[in-house]
Image: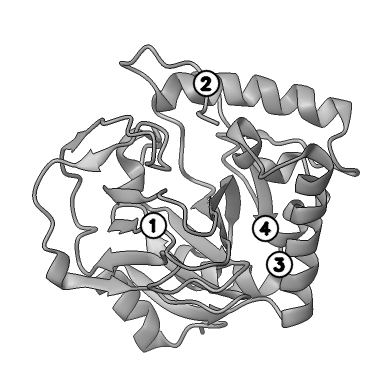
Amino acid sequence: MTKVLSESEVKNYQQRGYHFPVDVLTQSEVADFRGKLEEYEARTGGPIQGEMRHRSHVLFPWIDEMIRHPKILDAIEDILGPDILCWNTSFFIKEARDPGFVSWHQDATYWGLDSSDVATAWVAMSPANKVSGCMKFVAGTHKQQVQHEDTFDQNNLLTRGQEIAVKVDESQAVFAELKPGQASLHHVLLFHGSEPNRSDERRIGLAIRYIPTRLKQAVGQRDWATLVRGKDTYRHFEPSYVPKRELEPEALAFHKAVTDEQLKVLYRGTDRTEYRA
């Protein structure tokens, strides 16, 4: 029996590669989470940058709280089963009238995992719509990996500016419009991207990447993940640091070590060594 998604919604996810919207956070919860992000940004003098945008759940207790939110995990369990790891998190933030965009791509291309049985919960912390540059999907494109090309475009929010090498039919795009507190779910091989934010407000989303415990890192020598539900009898991943306070010295040291290792996987075949600002 499913917990959040109906049986037909699970079937549709399997056929289309995505499902949205899912109501996961209350208005007070999403306001609190956004407030904590923007308090941090106010203290540091600007939007969260560079490596701090990635695997942020090991640095900030409130993000660790979000990846364990029962409503998010109930939806993920309907797709992946009861034993779940959080492998990574990434902020995708577009400032008002920002030219930043995300090219058409498949997430699995450079991650190094040994299976595409991966689901991303993209949680909206602000309105995500066509004007503000919400995600867009092409249904049914998650059946196979296709070739990508690196662009390193300065306005592309992806690490390598990677984009699908074949022409994508824009007329088939489905726009995943979300209200704050809603999430979309998508398969790691689904064609997806997003356009610039043409609104006067920030567009803030947190992508949470969940994997079943049976997966392995097939490229990197080491990898880390956080058990968020069920049991991990495989232990293919080392346990991630769980923060008790914001930006603890131990958390920062762990985050740097893991980031250095992950960048070797993400940037393999290039001369890049760090996340862009």
Q: Position of residue 189 (x, y in %)?
A: 29, 52
Nearer mark to the viewer, of 2 and 1: 1
Q: Amino acid type of disc 3?
A: His
Element type at marker 2? loop
Q: Amino acid type of disc 4?
A: Ile
- Quadrant for residue 254, please give it: top right
Nearer mark to the viewer, of 2 and 4: 2
Task: Rate crowding at label 1 as few (under 14), some (14 to 19) or many (20 or more) other CA atoms within 10 Å.
Answer: many
Element type at marker 4? helix
Residue under numbered circle 3: 69
State which quarter of the image contains the C terminus: top right
Residue under numbered circle 2: 274
Residue 131, label in figure: none
Residue under numbered circle 4: 67
Label 3 and label 4: CA atoms lie apart by 6 Å
Q: Amino acid type of disc 2?
A: Glu
Residue under numbered circle 1: 196
Q: Amino acid type of disc 1?
A: Pro
Q: Position of residue 212 (x, y in %)?
A: 50, 52
The vertical placement of 147 against 169, above or below, is above
Nearer mark to the viewer, of 1 and 4: 1
Element type at marker 3? loop
- Which residue occupies the foreground of this view, 143 or 273? 273
